Structure formats: C-alpha cells, structure tokens
Amino acid sequence: MTAAGRVLILGGAGFIGYHLACRLADEGARAITLVDNLSRGRIDDDLSALLERPGLELRRADLTDPTAWTDLAAAWDQVYMLAAVVGVRNVVTDPSRVIDVNTRAVLNLVDWLTPQAGTVFFASTSEAYAGAVNGTLPVPTPEDVPLSIGAIENPRFAYAASKILGEAAVIHGARARRVPYIVGRFHNVYGPRMGFDHVVPELSVRALAREDPFKVYGLEQRRAFCYVTDAVEAMTRLMATPKAAGQIVNIGNDAEEVSIDRLVDIVLRLAEFAPAIERRPAPAGSPSRRCPDIGRLRALTGFAPKIDLASGVRQTFAWYRDHSAAGRSAR
C-alpha cells in the first residue's frame, strides 16, 4: 500500500485517531497533524511516545470554533474527521452537548473544505441503524438500510442523530465542493486506550476491581466486535482505493457475532475471577443484535479481519490491567 503524504487527523488524540496515527507513521506517511481539544483526556505516555516520531505534531484546538480552522488551510492528501463527543455516559448525561459539539464541528469541516483538502473520511457509527429495531433490521446489516431515529426523547439517540446529520453534511458539502469523501460506519470497535464507556474496558476494569456480584446489562444481546487495528486497516485501505470515493461503508468484523454472556465469560477468565452474575435488563433502545454486512468493504478493498475476539479482548484486558490507574484519563 502506498504511503500517505500529508495527513490531517481531526480528533487525533482520541482512541481511533491515536491508533490510526501509529499505523500511518509505521507506513511512512510524510507528515501527520493531529488536532484535538483534549476534552476527554490528556497527553499520556502512549501519545507522548507517538509525538516523538518524525513528522508528527499535535495542535490543540476547539473544532466547534470556526476560527480554529484558519490555521488548517494547507493542502492535505487525506483528512480524517474523527472528532466527536462519544460514549454512553456522555450521551445519557448531556445529550444536548453531544448534538451541539458534533454538529458544529462537522458543519465547520464542510465550510472549510476545498479541493486541496484531499480525500475526506467521516467517522459515522452503527448507531445510525439503531432506529430500525423491533425485528425490522436485517442482521448482518447492509449500508442501504433506511436510517431512522427511534424515540427521539431517548438520550441514547442523540449521538445517532448527530452522526446521521454529519453524514448528510459531509456527503452534500463534499459533493458541492468537488472533494472526494468516504463515510465509514464503525461497528463496536474496541481496544487499548479507548476510555471506559465501552463494554469491553468497562467489564475489564470491574473484573480487575473484583466487583461481586458482577452486574451485566443485556446478557442475551449479541454483538460483533472489531479490534481497533482491524478497523484502522479498513480505513487506510478505503482511503487508498479510488473506487471507495463517494461510498458509505460498514467497518467491522462479521466473523464472530457473540452474546454479551460469552464476552463476560472471556473477560472473567482473563481476570481469573468467578463472581456471582447479577443480570440486569438492557438499556432502553439498545438493539438485541448488531452485526455488520461488510461485503461492500471486502469488494472494494479485499479487507478481512485478522484479530479474533479472544485475542483482541486479551490485548485490551492486558492494557487496562497495566493502566488501571492512569488509564482513566486516556480515551
């Protein structure tokens, strides 16, 4: 795969942004600029080590402020829009902020776009499909499923609404400005340094803390989890594939759809812990199954997931075990 030239990663200090920057640096990208407001974290040891690599820089900026974009006027080969307020806790406690920040940032991105921006990747989410529940959603889920919002008053759907609007803004804005774009819908991406609002790190941290009884929500639900290095490989393959321009593409792992019960078993075995399980109902609006159809991704790029669930959870658990104190400030 040809190395990227000048790359701009918006939200670059975050979970996927960090791992993407590592991958691009390993592949020999000429210059990588990370932009982040560090609102959910800090410059931890992992990020500090990354920033020591040649050609990498971090700019601290608030992307909801239109003036912050004036310093980003140089030409780029690739632009990744990953900046957003994410996480169940943020969505439930302050849904209006999620809508405000995510919408302002993406609208500023669209206003900033020129043909010199290169190809733009917009990070969307499987939550965009969450409105089509109650048996109406095909699983595995293809990209052409009509998007909808369920109970609009449910805070859970604030994030989905912001991403659906973001997709529309990027698609129509990029077309109007003649900028190539790709929309990637991430499905349950997980891995080291992702914060604590995802089920894998949350279970890991609580198992390490020896919570007993061990609370689990929606044990019967099923998910297909994608390890972060696989997700990053899918992104870089799409950005290197001219035919991917103008496409909406699911990014995930369709090889292992597992129950939350099975995930809990893997984590507890790694923790060498056997607590009593306290079953709790799934959150309102949470789909019973989620698994992507990644046929479009395969056809465009030849992508195939490499990391199985047991291996990915083992690596993630080990990171949280080793960062159990400091990790709470990272995302």
Image (cartoon, grey):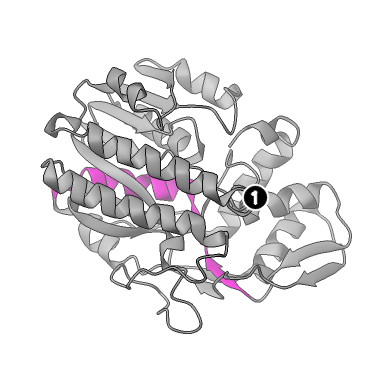
Report if residue 133 lies within the magenta region.
Answer: no
Q: Is residue 1 visible?
A: no
Q: Considering depth in this image, is 150 or 302 the residue closer to the camera?
A: 150
Residue range highlighted in magenta:
221-242
Let me know if residue 321 appears in the view. yes
> Mark 1: few, some, or many residues within 10 Å (few <14, many ≥20)?
few
In the image, residue 203 above or below residue 35: below
Above or below: residue 304 compared with residue 182: below
Quarter of the image containing the C terminus? Answer: top right
The N terminus appears in which quarter of the rendering? Answer: top left
- 241 relative position to 153: left or right: left
Q: Is residue 55 above or below residue 237?
A: above
- Image position, residue 103 (x, y; %): 39, 45
The residue sitting at 25% across, 39% down in the picture is 110
Residue 195 lies, in percent from the top left, at 62, 41
Residue 82, image x, y percentages: 40, 40
Q: Where is residue 233 shown, x and y percent of the image? A: 36, 46
Residue placed at 71% from the left, 54% from the top?
A: 203
Within the image, what quadrant is residue 251 found in? bottom left
Taking the spot 40% from the left edge, 37% from the top edge, the residue there is 20
Towards the viewer: 209 or 329: 329
Q: Quadrant of residue 76?
A: top left
Say above or below: 269 vs 191: below
Residue that carries the numbered disc 1 in the rendered image: 93
The answer to if 224 sits in the magenta stretch is yes
Is residue 52 found left or right of 78 in the rendered image? right
Q: Judge by depth and name the residue closer to the eye, 94 or 191.
A: 94
| Dot 1 amino acid type | Thr
Q: Residue at x 40, y 74 (%)?
A: 140
Secondary element at tag 1: helix
Question: Which residue is outermost to the bottom?
Answer: 135
